[in-house]
Structure formats: structure tokens, C-alpha cells
Image (cartoon, rainbow, N blue to C red):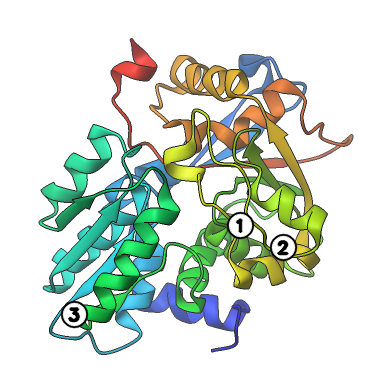
């Protein structure tokens, strides 16, 4: 496999992981119901196994090689950890998941419910990542990175493969960005297609926007409402090579817009999206990205691992 995925690698990933993941549905919403000038198409990855898109990359990484007796190890703000734990249980191997202190109770509980050993420590994701790497060196467990491995990017790219098949008329796709595995895989699939892939990040976690400004992945601030899922310290090198050439635009949204998007998804569709899962929609609501005339817009709702009462209460 090349250093970052192409369509052939993504198709192979789709075939490999098909027995283990869900082909998530689309929901078409009228713009009038959302206070928007155009209709939109939502890709509901919050309905994916374990509550986010993450099992796609986790399964592809784990099914691409022989798994060691020590099992697998991962660091995560929560969603990737749940996905790795879910995949490990499905494949009959042990999993050890490192999360930072900011990871919420719902995500911690889900990881443990899938049978993984949970280790909590460090203020943010980067500290958990360093601890997991040290532990992997001790045990020989396979590291399943949250976003910076070719197999992970190819697995996440299967979201775009499905979306293009089910909504072939889209001109733009909005994707929330943290470490960049999802948007990196999706941009790789859409490369050369004419579809504009738009990155949306919280103002408190401007990871890709900072990297694009500096011309390389560099550390960025981590904070705000969606930091548990979008709070990588810097984007992955593999995704940056894709994003630099194939992400049409990178925009930032305030926490207030993310919260408004969560509420709107609940009111309009009874969808409970976590803050990171609602971030892409927030760009439309607050005007951080304005669709050009005639645009057909798809929006990724990428995760739903939160306390339902925090959205629906």
C-alpha cells in the first residue's frame, strides 16, 4: 500500500471490512427545516458500530496483518478507543486503550463494555498517545493509530466510497477534522472527482488550519467543546499530504455553533450527535462556509458518543 491511500486501496478496505461494519444510511433534510437556503444530505456515521466512523479504519488495520498474541493497543479521545475495543472483541484478541482525562464517562463506559483494558491519564490526547506507544514497546501489541496509518486512512475512506455511490450528485462534502484520518481518507477517494471536500474544525482545535497555514503538520491548541473527539495536537503526516492537494477549504467554527448544530440535529431529525459529530453542520449554520449557487451539499455526522441528556434535555 502507498503511503496514503488511493481508490484501489479504499476499495480493498471496503471488501475487507464489509463483514464487520454497517453501511450507514443517508438522510435528506429540507433546507427550510434547518433555516438554510438549500437542502442537504447527511451521512449518518453516528449509526456506525460503536457510535462513530472509527471501526472502518480499526478493522482495516487489524485485518491487514497477523495479530500478535499481545493483542492491540491504541490511544484515543474515546471514539477510536471504542472502535478498537469493538474490533478486538469481534476478532477475539485483547485490547488496551489509553485515553486522556478529558474523555467523558459515556466514552469510557463504552470502551470497557467492549471488554478492553482502559487506562486513563494525561490532560489531552497526545499524552495518552505517548503512554500507549511506550506500553506497546513493552508488550509487543499491535498499535492501531487513530489517524496516521495507511490502513486506517483507507478504512475511513470507505465512508466517501459509500457516500459517492448513494449520493452521486454532491458537489461539496463537509467533514469534521481532528487528527485527520476521516477527511484524509475521504479526500483521497474524491481526489480528481470535482467534489470539494471542506474541512471543519472548532476554533479551539485548529489543527489542519494551522498545518495548512504553516505548510506542514505542527502543534496546535487543543480546547473547547469538541476536544475529546477533535483534539489531536497536530494532524497526521499521511493525511496532510492528501489534504494539501485535495481539501478544497478549511474553516473554523465557534463552540456556540457546534452546540446549535447538536440542538438542530435533535429537533429536526431526533439525532443525538456528540459535539465532534455536529461540527461539520455547524459550518453551514454559522456561515463559516457558504455554499456556492447550485451546490449539492453532503455533511458527515461522524459520531454520537455522548450522554443523550446533554443534547435532548
Left or right, 139 with respect to 303, comes to left
Q: Which residue is mark 3?
A: 139
Residue 30 sits above or below residue 193 on the image? above
Q: Quadrant of the C terminus?
A: top left
x then y, percent, for residue 156: 49, 63
**Front in this rendered view, residue 152 or 104:** 104
**Front in this rendered view, residue 58 or 46:** 58
Residue 183, numbered label: 1
Residue drawn at x 56%, y 17% as measured from the top left: 260
Q: Quadrant of the N terminus?
A: bottom right
Residue 125 sits above or below residue 95 on the image? above
Which corner quadrant of the image does residue 161 belong to?
A: bottom right
| Cα distance in 3D space between marks 3 and 2 | 34 Å
Q: Which residue is mark 2?
A: 243
Q: Are marks 1 and 2 in contact (CB under 8 Å)?
A: yes
**Element on which disc 2 rests:** helix
**Element on which disc 3 rests:** helix
Q: Is residue 302 visible?
A: no
**Element on which disc 1 rests:** helix
**Front in this rendered view, residue 6 or 27:** 6
Amino acid at each position: 500500500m502507498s503511503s496514503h491511500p488511493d481508490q484501489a486501496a479504499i476499495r480493498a478496505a471496503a471488501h475487507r471490512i464489509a463483514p464487520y461494519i454497517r453501511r450507514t444510511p443517508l438522510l435528506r433534510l429540507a433546507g427550510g427545516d434547518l433555516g438554510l437556503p438549500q437542502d442537504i444530505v447527511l451521512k449518518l456515521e453516528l449509526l456506525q458500530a460503536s457510535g462513530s466512523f472509527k471501526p472502518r479504519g480499526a478493522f482495516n488495520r487489524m485485518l491487514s496483518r497477523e495479530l500478535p498474541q499481545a493483542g492491540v493497543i491504541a490511544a484515543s479521545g474515546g471514539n477510536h478507543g471504542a472502535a478498537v475495543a469493538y474490533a478486538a472483541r469481534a476478532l477475539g484478541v485483547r485490547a488496551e486503550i489509553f485515553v486522556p482525562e478529558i474523555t467523558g464517562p459515556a466514552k469510557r463506559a463504552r470502551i470497557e463494555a467492549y471488554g478492553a483494558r482502559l487506562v486513563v491519564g494525561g490532560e489531552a490526547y497526545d499524552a495518552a498517545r505517548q503512554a500507549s506507544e511506550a506500553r506497546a514497546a513493552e508488550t509487543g501489541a499491535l498499535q492501531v493509530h487513530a489517524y496516521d496509518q495507511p490502513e486506517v486512512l483507507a478504512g475511513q475512506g470507505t465512508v466517501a466510497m459509500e457516500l459517492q455511490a448513494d449520493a452521486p450528485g454532491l458537489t461539496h462534502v463537509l467533514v469534521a477534522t481532528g487528527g485527520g484520518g476521516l477527511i484524509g481518507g475521504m479526500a483521497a477517494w474524491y481526489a480528481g472527482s470535482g467534489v470539494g471536500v471542506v474541512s471543519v474544525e472548532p476554533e479551539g482545535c485548529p489543527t489542519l488550519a494551522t498545518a495548512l497555514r504553516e505548510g506542514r503538520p505542527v502543534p496546535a491548541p487543543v480546547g473547547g467543546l469538541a476536544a475529546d473527539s477533535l483534539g489531536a495536537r497536530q494532524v497526521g503526516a499521511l493525511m496532510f499530504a492528501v489534504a494539501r492537494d485535495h481539501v478544497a477549504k478549511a474553516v473554523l467554527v465557534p463552540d456556540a455553533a457546534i452546540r446549535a448544530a447538536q440542538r438542530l440535529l435533535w429537533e429536526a431529525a431526533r439525532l443525538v450527535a456528540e459535539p465532534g459529530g455536529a461540527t461539520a453542520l455547524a459550518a453551514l449554520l454559522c456561515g463559516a462556509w457558504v455554499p456556492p449557487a447550485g451546490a449539492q451539499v453532503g455533511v458527515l455526522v461522524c459520531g454520537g458518543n455522548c450522554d443523550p441528556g446533554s443534547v435532548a434535555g
